[in-house]
Each structure stands twice: as structure tokens, then as C-alpha cells.
Image (tube, rainbow, N blue to C red):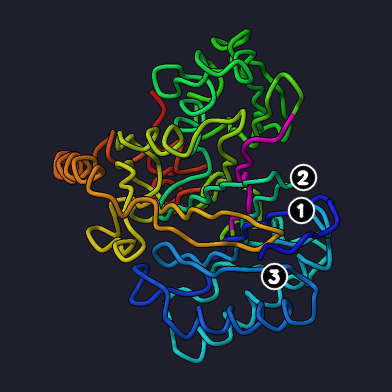
Amino acid sequence: MRLIVERQKLTLSVFTADVGGFVGHVSSHPDILDTAKERLYIAREKGFIVDFHVLRCGDDLELIITHRSGCANSGVHELVWNTFNACKEVSMDLGLYAHDRGLSSRDFTGSVKLMGPGAAEVEFMERGSEPVLVLMSNKTSTGSWNLPVYRVYADPFNTSGLVLDPSMAEGFSFTVLDIEQNSEITLQAPKELHSLLALIGSTSRYVVTSVRRNTDNEIACVVASQKLNMSGERAASKCEPAVIMRCHDGLPSVGEAMEAFAHPYLVEGWMRGAHTGPLMPVPFYEANPTRFEGPPRAIGAGFQITDGRLIGPHDMFDDPSFDETRRVANNVTDYLRRHGPFQPHRMSWAELERTGPSPVADKLKERFEKL
């Protein structure tokens, strides 16, 4: 029997971090996942959080947590920070690859944002039935969710509910972050659709961070936007973000949200964060990018949230209807790899320098002669 709890807002928080790869950048070691589970289990038993689930995509660790402390709560962020650091210690003991790249060495200041991990958090009043999708990626960049988020919440060719469901007829508003200027703007679709596309098509600079329903400002989607670039100690666009999508009852259905990933669109990242490749949606067990550390992967975890409990996950891409998507992604991978170090497979110098100056270009610049 379902327990009746006092109606209050719930917070769903998703945190991602790279605390060391096994082997190389391919996967996460089981001991890392077990360490995270042990830490969060204790927090749940103490009543500090309501529920949790631990996943990984490639070598990125994901902590999915429900609680009632609100977004950006320092206590929850400290729990996550300590959990990631405990995992890092295990990673160091195992000698896992790049265990020192994902977390800042600075002291915790109240939030994990800009300290290495990515964070996506949404607070809402739980509905009678609350289906939620949590999508995670590996070998991608921050703007990698722009295209599917646009399709889910603004494209009637993907989401028929935009023309069939009266509660969605007024469309959705997109909050967009300008990474370079550290500023944001909110644009309404369909009213400002062309302006929206003019921005978010530039995925390395403009990032959709949240989506709300126009009729009542109900939150529909949240995307992890920025995290610290450990090589340059600054916020950058090179990270593997997560996205949270609420579904049904006046929001796009689960099927409409999943349809946006049937096309293996191109994203930045892949090998050394310096290449463009197709985003391949895969089941949990296939999130092991080994070919040229790719191609980039995405996994989808489906939950029914009931009184804060995470019922699930269901492996959303473990479905033969995505086999053709994966086949096309492999063909695109073959085509791009034949370009070797040439664009458009390898990103331009301007894009590469977003994560820090190139040592190769710096070494050669004095040999260039003015014409």
C-alpha cells in the first residue's frame, strides 16, 4: 500500500564526475560504484536524503538523489563532494586512470559547481504519477543536449503533443546560458523560435539549462550547464552533462522524449575532447566507449518517483528500435575516422582553445614570419 505523506516539494539532484577510469577512459570500476552506494546508503538511513541510485556512463560516475532540502543545498552538495572524494581515494588505491582530473583540490565552499562535478537539480511538487527520465553522456560537451531538448519541447514533428495536447499548445520557454559572457536569456517557443535556434545551434557557446511550460511556468527539464575545466581552473564547455526530463500530464510523453534520440546527431568531445562524433544511445551495459575512446555515448534511466522514492531505473535505450540508430552511428564513425586529424572530425583551433591554449601552437608561433 502506498504511504500517504504530507504534500511538499521534492528535489531531484543529479551529479556527475570523473574520478578515474577503468581501463583508461572506458568504464568505472565496480569498487567505485560500491563506495558511492555505501556513502549514500548511510545518508538515506539517517533520513538526510529520501532515496538514491548510482549509475555510470563510460568512466563518468552519476549520483541520482531525491531529497527535500531544495536546489543548491550546501548539505546535499557536501554529501556529494565527500562521496566523490571517497571514490577518488579508492580510484587512487586501484591506480585507475586520470583519478586526479575530475575534482578540484580546493576546499569545499558550499557547492560542487565549478569544482569539477556537473550538477542538474530540479524542485517540483510531485504529481500523482511522476515519470522522469535522467539522461547521461560520456565523451561529449555541455551543449550536446541542445538539439534533443529543442526537439522534445519545441518541434511538433518530434512531439505531437505540441499540437494535440491543449495544455502544451502555448509552448515552452527555454533558458539559455552564454558560456563566454556568463549571462543568460529566456526565450519563448514558438513565439521566439527562430531567435532560440540562432543561439542554441552554436552548441559550444550557448547552452539550454532549463525548460518551463509557458502556461504556468511549470518546470519540465533541467540540464547540467557548467563545470570546472581542471586543466585551466575555469568554467568551460567541455564536460559530460546530465539532463532531467519530467514527462506526461501536460508535458511531453516518455515516448516523445525518447524519439529525439533516434537520430545520432553530431557532438563535440570524443577522443581528448578534441573531435566531433555521433552520439550513440546505448543500454547501460554498452556504455563502454573503446573505439578511439568513442563514439560518444548516451544512456537513459527511467524512474517513477513515488513519495520521493526512485522506482527503477528502467534502461530506456535497451530497445531494438534503437538498433538502426546505433548502426547509423557506427557508419558515421567510420566516415569521420577516415578524416584523421583533419576538420571537421578534429575540432578547429578556436574550439580547442576554449579549454586552454594549445602547447603545439604556442611552440610554433615564434617561427611564423609576417608577410
Q: Residue at x 18, y 46 (%)?
A: 330
- Element class at badge 3: helix
Give, as a single range, the part of the protein colored magenta.
218-229
Three-letter code for the amino acid on which mark 2 is drawn: Met
Please identify the residue farthest to the front as the structure is shown.
1
Task: Name the mark on residue 80.
Answer: 3
Is any atom of residue 337 visible in this view?
Answer: no
Q: Residue at x 40, y 48 (%)?
A: 269
In the foreground, 74 or 46: 46
- Element class at badge 1: strand
Label 3–label 1 contact, CB within 8 A: no
Label 3–label 2 contact, CB within 8 A: no
Image coords of residue 31 (percent x, y): 47, 86
Left or right, residue 235 beside residue 254: right
How far is mark 1 from mark 2, CA to CA?
6 Å
How far is mark 3 from mark 2, CA to CA?
23 Å
Secondary structure predominantly adopted by residues drawn in magenta:
strand
Image coords of residue 218 (percent x, y): 73, 31
Q: Is residue 304 above or below residue 369?
A: below
- Element class at badge 2: strand
Task: Name the mark on residue 10.
Answer: 1
Residue behind mark 2:
125
* Sequence order check, earlier mark of 3 and 1: 1
Label 1–label 2 contact, CB within 8 A: yes
Identify the image quadrant of residue 52: bottom right
* Sequence order check, earlier mark of 1 and 2: 1
In the foreground, 210 or 163: 163
Three-letter code for the amino acid on which mark 3 is drawn: Val
